[in-house]
């Protein structure tokens, strides 16, 4: 694990596993970081040289390196406010049957 400082934000590299699957049962992409790393609101995770997709019916698992950039207090506050505002947008969804009355 390599640690560097970018301005006022701390960053470090960590190995990770990238899994992408596109089948009739599932469509997903996951990044699993090695070690017990706690990702918090405002943090950034950048996976280096990550694959972007697979053909239908395929599953791909590769090892890569990820850079984690820790968010500062303002980044954490911004992420929490944005998350709250995104959640309140869900309240505006109508659960009607879709028929005009």
Image: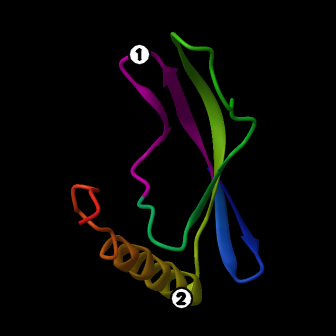
Image x and y of residue 79, in percent: 50, 78
In the displayed structure, 95 sits above or below 47; it is below
Left or right position of 99 against 19: left
- In front here: 59 or 39? 59
- In front here: 58 or 31? 58
- In front here: 43 or 54? 54
- The outermost residue toward the top is 57
In the displayed structure, 42 sits above or below 16; it is below
The reply to whether the magenta stretch includes residue 26 is yes
Say which residue appears at 55% left-offset and 37% top-offset: 16
The tag earlier along the polypeptide, 1 or 2, is 1
User: Which marked residue is nearer to the observer: mark 1 or mark 2?
Assistant: 1
The reply to whether the magenta stretch includes residue 62 is no
Image x and y of residue 35, in percent: 43, 45
Location of the C terminus by quadrant is bottom left
Q: Residues within 10 Å of mark 2 (few under 14, many from 20)?
A: few
| Dot 1: element | loop
Residue linked to disc 2 = 73
Q: Quadrant of residue 61?
A: top right
Say which residue appears at 55% left-offset and 32% top-offset: 18
| Magenta highlight: main SS | strand
Left or right position of 40 against 55: left
Boundaries of the magenta span? 13-37
Q: Quadrant of residue 63?
A: top right
User: Residue 24 has which mark?
Assistant: 1
Image x and y of residue 68, in percent: 61, 58
In the displayed structure, 30 sits above or below 86; it is above
Say which residue appears at 67% left-offset and 77% top-offset: 9
- The outermost residue toward the front is 101
In the displayed structure, 39 sits above or below 42; it is above
């Amino acid at each position: 694990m390599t640690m560097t400082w970018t301005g006022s934000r701390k960053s470090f590299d960590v190995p990770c596993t990238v899994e992408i699957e596109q089948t009739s049962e599932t469509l997903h992409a996951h990044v699993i970081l090695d070690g017990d790393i706690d990702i918090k609101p405002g943090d950034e995770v950048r996976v280096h040289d990550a694959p972007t997709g697979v053909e239908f019916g395929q599953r791909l698992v590769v090892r890569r390196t990820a850079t984690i950039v820790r968010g500062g207090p303002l980044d954490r506050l911004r992420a929490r406010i944005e998350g709250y505002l995104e959640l309140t947008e869900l309240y505006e969804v109508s659960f009607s049957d879709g028929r005009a009355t």
